Amino acid sequence: MDVHFYKNLDCTGHFLNLAKPEFYTPLPDNWCIAVSDVRNSTREIKNGRFRDVNLNGASLIAAISNAIPETELPFSFGGDGSVIAFPGCYRKKAEEIIKRCRTHAKKHFNLDLAAGIVPISDLYEEGHPLMVAKFQTSEHVNQASFLGNGIIVAEEWVKQNSNEEEYSKADTNVDLSGLECRWNPFPADELAISLIVDVIEPSFNSQFQIYQSVLSKIYQIFDDVHSSPIKEKDMKLTFRFKNMWSEAKMRSKSEWYNRIRYFIKLIFLQLTGKYFMKYDVSTNKTDWGDYKPDFVKNSDYRKFSQSLKMVITGSLQMKNELEKFLDSLYKQGLLVYGIHVTDSTVTTCYVKEYQSNHIHFIDGTGGGYTMASIDFKKRLNKLQHQKTELVSNN
């Protein structure tokens, strides 16, 4: 078994290359993929719990990565859930971790986290491809891109077979080290646009061609650098009780005194972090003046995870021009898209090391990806209804 398959995979430093087939490699059939999804996330987000949803949506990434530190694993965050692939020899370990993550979400946050594992070989046997590419966001951090309908099929299988009995008595002790939520929302100059685009052409070559056209149009409308929702000047550490308490619940043991202790520790870390970054302090392990620039580079505001997902900033005119272009392709039956607009973005962070090795999962404030997926599903249902009517009329 090639445990280091992903670690040894060639990478590209240009995001546009992720719309080219030559940069993708099928996942090995002796690997597995774990997927998670916070059930009823729309309701929870409307109740103001998008931070809790994001943290628990990302918990699988942190927990499995921490449990398998000896190699590099491909993963992707989707707002209210995540996917992570790993060698099949770690399956038993991952199954126990998933049970604990689900129990943790239920007992600490009263959230129902549907999660499970699907062998890649099962997907391939049913004719569902799953390919991965590696995008180098900075010298120390790579971001995985997934294409092929294997992810969406795996999610459907897991949701169908995910039940409470599996985790009702499981331990909540799970290593979520590095999973953080320590920044205020990042204000957009005008609009923060959460976007999902899924090309529905059957052939891979056609899919890649359309994705290339979509990305070319996006970067024709939006400047590549300025469309990033994360700007150093807007980065402010949070001291909001609700945000910090979410991390305290996520990272500490369930007893109230442990949470209070962690919360007090977090206040101290925020104060020292603010000072260190302001004055470019260097400690034994970290040059704190590098943290914000690295944060900007290591933010996953654009990705491929079954579909193209982006959180970008721009004007109303830019948003309307993009929507007009996407709508023309939608009416041709080439793709389905969903879009949601807010005035800011938020991040959930996974920090392996404060010196360069940290990745930041970006979402629109108030559940940008989740709300965009609602818009996406409306268009998908409409398109499927039109196709059904067309068939019945013929």
Image: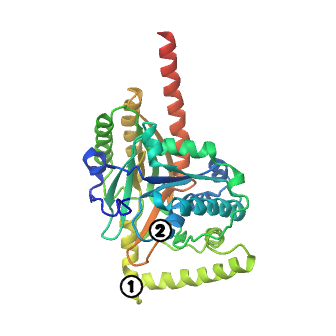
**Residue 199 lies in quadrant:** top left
> Residues under labels 1 and 2: Cα distance?
33 Å
Vertical placement of 94 versus 175: above or below?
above
**Residue 242 lies in quadrant:** bottom right
From the viewer's perspective, tell me whether residue 245 is left or right of residue 90: right
Q: Can residue 79 be seen in this view?
A: no
Amino acid bearing label 1? Asp
Neighbours of disc 2 within 10 Å: few (<14), some (14-19), many (20+): some
Disc 1 or disc 2, which is closer to the eye?
A: 2
Mark 1 or mark 2: name the one nearer the start of the chain. Answer: 2
Query: Which residue shows up at 51% across the image and 66% down it?
Result: 62
Query: Which residue shows up at 54% across the image and 71% down it?
Result: 182
Tell me the quarter of the image containing the N terminus. bottom left
The residue most toward the top is: 394
Q: Which mark is residue 213?
A: none
Residue 191 point in image, percent of width and height: 45, 52
Residue 107 point in image, percent of width and height: 72, 63
Query: Which residue shows up at 68% across the image and 49% down it?
Result: 163
Front residue (pair 171, 356) = 171
Q: Can residue 192 be seen in this view?
A: yes
Q: Is mark 2 on a helix, strand or loop?
A: loop
- For disc 2, the marked residue is 68
Amino acid bearing label 2? Ile
Front residue (pair 152, 256) = 152
- For disc 1, the marked residue is 280
**Residue 139 lies in quadrant:** bottom left
Q: What element carries label 1?
A: loop
Residue 223 point in image, percent of width and height: 30, 53
